[in-house]
Amino acid sequence: MPTGEADKASGLKERIEVFVDEMKKGNSVNSCEIAINTINLLIRIISQAKFTNARELLKHVKAEGKYLQAGDPSENIIGNMIRRVLKIIREEYRAIISQEAGQERSVNFEDTSLADDEEEDYAKPTPNLKASVIEAISELKTEIEGGAENIAAMATNYIHENDIILTIGRSRTVEAFFKSAALKKIKFQVLVSECAPFCHGHEMAKNLAEAKINTTLITECQIGTIMPRVNKVIIGTHSFMANGGLKAVTGTNILALLAKEHNKDVIVCSSLYKLSPLFHSTLKHASFNKFASPNELLDYEDAELLSKVEVIAPIFDYVPPDLISMVVSNNGPQSVSYVYRLVKDYYHPDDTEL
């Protein structure tokens, strides 16, 4: 291997190791950062890969992707990006083969769906595949970076004058959503549940107050009391599953249950890169949740008590789809019952298991 190629391969391996190490330590800042970092790595992996056809590239990306996912098996975003890239490879391969056969390239909704069902071994030589795939992945990266901004632009369709809105914890997408409505001179009130014991809601309330939005910080135990006063619930999510259920911050499930009890709409703001083709819990996807240290709840002075109890501090809740009214995505509003169609559009069934 020439020296230049060896240096590139060594540099890529180092970047992959750093990424995996950061994921193991839980040092990632937010979902968007994880998605962008994963995309950047996949672009590097593909640009340095040597292959003669799509089948070899698919195999290579799957192998590298499996290693990236192993850094944090419970992090859906990494798997989502890997599967999106695998889908892009398949689509670009079919487009090149169609062009070479003298057929017009089609991006028609039905044609793409039918093509997914056709038997294809991806073994034909495609010399222009690498450039086409990298260009398409770069477009995906641009879409992800602008997702929150696109969602925020729709805020006035869902936030109205004198609304009282309840949210929980801190979601950057929801924060931008509220700020966008405030910039349109809409007067509304936001009640922020603090999301104890991590209390991310404190930062959310502070940021909204600085944006001159009428904001009140509440505790989780007050949600049931104030729910009758609320007009709607607007929340973010870490990811949403193939059945439309949410993987969201702890406390979201009880909030959604109370909202349904009081006939309040629950609106979820989420970019489509958070859509996962996986379900809440299967034998092959057992690592749905993460668990934090309970030191926020119990002091070390209680050592005698701690030796007699097991304290579990889950980071995420599962929220069933029947508790969700609507998902506002970067591609517009989506019905929860339509999620299965989105999964089919964005992922190939052969890539569900990496």
Image: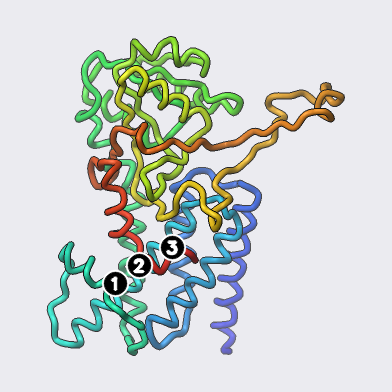
Q: Is residue 218 above or below residue 233?
A: above
Q: CA distance from mark 2 to mark 3?
A: 11 Å
Local packing at callout 3 (Cα closer than 10 Å; few below 14, some 14-19, many 20+) is few
Q: Are marks 1 and 2 in contact (CB under 8 Å)?
A: yes
* Residue 168 showing in the rendered view: yes
Residue at numbered disc 1:
91
Residue 198's x, y, as percent? 59, 28
Q: Position of residue 15 (x, y in %)?
A: 58, 64
Task: Kindly identify which residue carries mark 3.
Answer: 352
The answer to which of marks 1 and 3 sits earlier in the sequence is 1
Q: Which mark is residue 87?
A: 2
Q: Secondary structure at mark 1?
A: helix
Q: CA–CA distance between discs 1 and 2?
A: 6 Å
Foreground pick, 20 / 284? 284
Image coordinates of residue 26 in percent, x first then y, are: 61, 47
Name the residue: 57% across, 55% down: 73
Is 118 above or below relative to 76? below
